[in-house]
Image: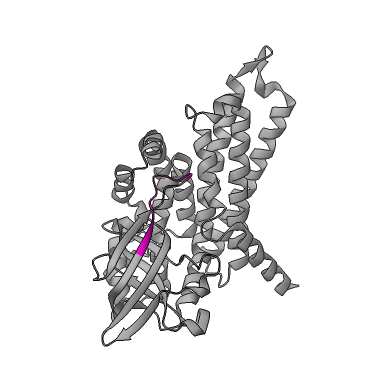
Amino acid sequence: DLAREIAREKIAPLAPYHDETETYPEEPMRILAEQGLMGIWVPEGHGGTGMGALALCLAVEEVAWACAATATNFLATPLGGYPILLAGTEEQKKRYLPRLASGEILSAYSLSEPGAGSDAASLQTQAVRKGDSYILNGTKLWCSNGDHAGVITLFATVDRSKGAKGVTAFLVEPTFPGFAIGKKEKKLGIRASPTVAIHLNDCEVPVENRLGDEGEGFKVAMKTLDYTRPPTGAIALGIAQAALDAALAYAAERKQFGQPIAAFQGIQFMLADMAMAVHASRLLVHHVAQLVDRGTSRVVLEASMAKCFAADTAMRVATDAVQIFGGYGYTRDYPVERFMRDAKITQIYEGTNQIQRMVIAREILALS
C-alpha cells in the first residue's frame, strides 16, 4: 500500500518528464529512501526491515507501474547489495548494509564487459594482488545506476586462463584511485535510469573489499541473479499492468461506429489475453519470491521462468496496448509508447530471455 501510494502520487506524475529529459529521478529516489522502502531486502539486524523477497517484488511492481526507470534504479541497490548478504564478511555487512538500507548510499552491480555479456565467465578485467590491495584494470559496461552508487559489486578475474574459476568479486567505491565513470548510454527506454561504462586504470581496491575468496565470484554472481530475477520480473509485471490499465480505460472511452471500442470482440479478445498473461506472470513472480522467503536452497528454474515469462508478457501487452490506442498510441501524448519502449529492456537485462530459456531447458532436462 505504501509503495502504491508513493508510486501513483509522487513517481507517476514525474515519469514523463524524466523520460523526455533523460534525467535522474532524484526526488522519487529520495522519497523511497525516506519511507524505508530501500531496506525491504535487508535483515533487521543490519538496519533493514527484513520483509523479504515477496515484499520487495510487491514494491518493485508498484514503482514500475509508475516508472520502470525508477524501478530499475530502486532494484539496483538489492542487485549490488545481495552479494554482500550472500558472501560478505560480518565487517563488510556492518560497513555497507545499514547505509544501503537507509538510502544513505545506493549500490550497483557490474558484471558485463565489451566482450562478456551473456558469456559472463569470459570477462577480461584483471585483478592482481599487490600487498594489501588488488590492482584492477579493464572496462565494464551496462552498469545500471553506476554513476549514483556509493558501492559497486564488481567482478574481475585473477586468472583469465581459469575462466569462471578465476572470477572474483570486489566491493568497489567510486572514490578509489583509478576508478572512473565512462560513457552514459542513450537508450530506447528506461531513460531515467543511467546505464554507464566503468573504467579501471590501476584501480586500487583494499584486500578487505574482496567479496568471498578468489575464484568464488562467478558463483556469487549467479546466486545473486537467482534472488534478483524475481523482482526483475516484477518490473516487467508493473509495466504490463500499467499498459493493461491504460488499454482498458481507453477502450471503454474511445468510440467508433457509435459505441466504445471495448464492445468489439476483436478488442475484447486482446484485453482478455493481456489480462491472462499479466495474471500468470504475477503468480510466477510471487511463487518464486515465496520460495526464496521459505529458504528454498535452489530456485534457478523458477527464477528464470518468472523473469522470462513476465518480460515476454510486458513486451506483448505493451505492444497490444499501443495497438488498442491506434494512432494515438504511437504519440507521446499517451504513456503506452513509453511502456513499450521500457518493456523491451526486461527481455534483455539480468540475463536475456534466450539465456533464460537455456537455463530452463538445462534445469528441466536434469530433472527428467
Q: Which residues are magenta?
A: 188-198
Q: Nearer the viewer, residue 22 or 216?
A: 22
Seen in the picture, residue 368 relative to 162 is either above or below; the reply is: above
Question: Is residue 226 shown above or below 336?
Answer: below
Q: Is 231 left or right of 203, judged from the image as shown?
A: right
Q: Is residue 131 left or right of residue 324?
A: left
Residue lying at 39% horizontally and 52% vertically, measured from the top left: 74
| Residue 134 locus on image (x, y percent) | 31, 81
- Residue at the outermost right position: 368
**Colour pattern of the rendering:** one colour
Q: Quadrant of the C terminus?
A: bottom right
Considering only vertical position in the picture, is 250 above or below 67? Answer: above
Q: Residue 219: x percent and y percent?
A: 50, 76
Query: Closer to the camera, 74 or 139?
Result: 139
Q: Is residue 310 magenta?
A: no
Q: How many marks?
A: 0
Q: Which quarter shows the N terminus?
A: top left
Q: Position of residue 117 (x, y in %)?
A: 52, 65
In this view, which residue lies farthest toward the bottom? 131
Residue 45: in sight, yes or no? no
The part of the image, by quadrant, that contains residue 251 is top right
Specify the principal SS of the magenta part: loop
Which residue is found at the position 40% from the left and 37% from the top?
A: 15
**Image: 105 above or below 336:** below
Q: Quadrant of residue 106?
A: bottom left
Q: Decide whether residue 192 is among the magenta residues.
A: yes
Please indicate, yes or no, whether residue 99 appears anywhere in the rendered image.
yes
* Residue at the image position 47 percent from the left and 73 percent from the top: 123
Residue 281 locus on image (x, y percent): 61, 49
